[in-house]
Image: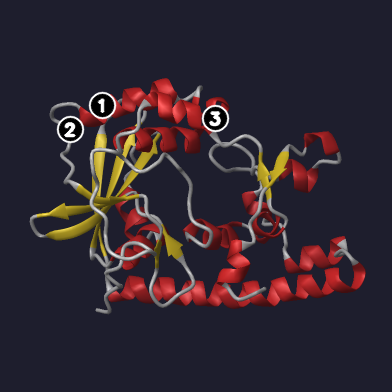
């Protein structure tokens, strides 16, 4: 099986974790799995987020809780997390601390020492970046660990995570064959650990998918650019052709409508609560600038 590069940092050699954790900076990478998976979810969502640079003002509670919980696990204090964004983390810190205590309680599944936490890596061979929660040292070698929170465990958890593009990409980027998906149930604090193994078939599937989507991104982005260059904007009909709305995904994400639902379907400008953020790094990464 083709192995990924052993490099775990864009700046060189692996850095071992010390008593002081890396600065609390939750979030993904510019061309990570979320970038590619957003296309699979909805082309219009991808356009609004990555071309227009529009991001909902309010982060979904589930994502804020996951970030706070993971920050606590990596040694950040509740104060540090709160100060990073008081509006986002105040509502979830108590629950995150409760989950943290449950995860660290006697009898909870053990965790191996972390070598690297939250560093951006490149997936070899494809235009995709990755940011594993941690790379661990075990008696049998290195592996990655991904922390997740869930409302409840499901019978299909093992099958779902076994073919997760996020986890496959992280294993490829870290140069390891094994991942542990560490899921804590929010209501009871129970923990389920799922082992995921990298296989040639999974590598081939992710490489083929990303390469295919990369070609589509180039075609559609260049076509959009040509419309804007000539007319200063793109007509609604051409926008629908290039970046159609995925109707099946408009009504449900994290238990609520898509964060761009109002933008796509409401006539009220006041309901479009978004902030403009710079998202051009992916264009340079894909040689589209």
Q: Which mark is residue 108?
A: 2
Query: In this rendering, is residue 82 above or below 212?
Result: above
Check disc 1: other Cα within 10 Å, few if <14, some if 14-19, many if 20+: some
State how the image is colored.
secondary structure
Q: Nearer the viewer, residue 240 or 176?
A: 176
**What residue does disc 3 label?**
88
Snapshot quadrant of residue 105: top left
The tag earlier along the polypeptide, 3 or 1, is 3
**What residue does disc 1 label?**
102
Spatial CA distance of label 2 from label 1 is 7 Å
**Which residue is situated farthest in the top direction here?**
94
Of the residues tagged 3 and 1, which is closer to the observer? 3
The tag earlier along the polypeptide, 2 or 1, is 1
Residue 129 horizontal/vertical position (percent): 45, 64
Q: Nearer the viewer, residue 94 or 154?
A: 94
Instruction: Specify whether residue 233 is in view.
Output: yes
Left-right relation of 276 to 253: right
Marks 2 and 1 in Cβ contact (< 8 Å)? yes
Give the residue displayed 30% in from the left and 67% down from the top: 7
Give the residue displayed 31% in from the left and 62% down from the top: 8
Secondary structure beneath label 2: loop
Check disc 2: other Cα within 10 Å, few if <14, some if 14-19, many if 20+: few
Q: Nearer the viewer, residue 48 or 232?
A: 232
Left-right relation of 234 to 151: right
Give the residue displayed 74% in from the left and 68% down from the top: 242
Spatial CA distance of label 2 from label 3 is 28 Å
């Amino acid at each position: 099986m083709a192995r990924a590069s052993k490099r775990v940092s864009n700046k060189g050699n692996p850095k071992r974790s010390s008593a002081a954790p890396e600065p609390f900076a939750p979030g993904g990478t510019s061309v990570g799995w979320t970038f590619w998976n957003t296309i699979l979810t909805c082309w219009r969502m991808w356009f609004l987020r990555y071309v227009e640079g529009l991001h909902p003002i309010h982060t979904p509670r589930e994502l804020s809780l996951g970030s706070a919980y993971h920050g606590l696990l990596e040694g950040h204090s509740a104060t540090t997390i709160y100060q990073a964004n008081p509006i986002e983390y105040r509502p979830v810190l108590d629950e995150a601390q409760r989950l943290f205590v449950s995860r660290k309680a006697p009898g909870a599944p053990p965790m191996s020492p972390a070598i690297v936490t939250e560093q951006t890596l490149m997936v070899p061979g494809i235009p995709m970046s990755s940011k594993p929660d941690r790379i661990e040292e075990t008696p049998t070698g290195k592996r990655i660990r991904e922390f997740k929170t869930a409302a409840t465990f499901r019978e299909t958890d093992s099958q779902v995570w076994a073919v997760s593009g996020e986890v496959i990409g992280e294993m490829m980027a870290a140069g390891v064959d094994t991942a542990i998906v560490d899921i804590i149930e929010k209501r009871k604090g129970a923990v389920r650990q799922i082992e995921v193994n990298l296989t040639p078939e999974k590598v081939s599937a992710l490489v083929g998918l990303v390469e295919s989507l990369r070609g589509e991104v180039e075609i559609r982005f260049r076509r959009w650019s040509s419309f804007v260059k000539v007319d200063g904007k793109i007509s609604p009909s051409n926008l629908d052709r290039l970046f159609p709305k995925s109707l099946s995904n408009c009504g449900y994400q994290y238990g609520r409508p898509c964060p761009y639902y109002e933008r796509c379907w409401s006539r009220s400008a006041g309901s479009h609560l978004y902030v403009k953020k710079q998202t051009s790094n992916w264009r340079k990464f894909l040689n589209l600038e």
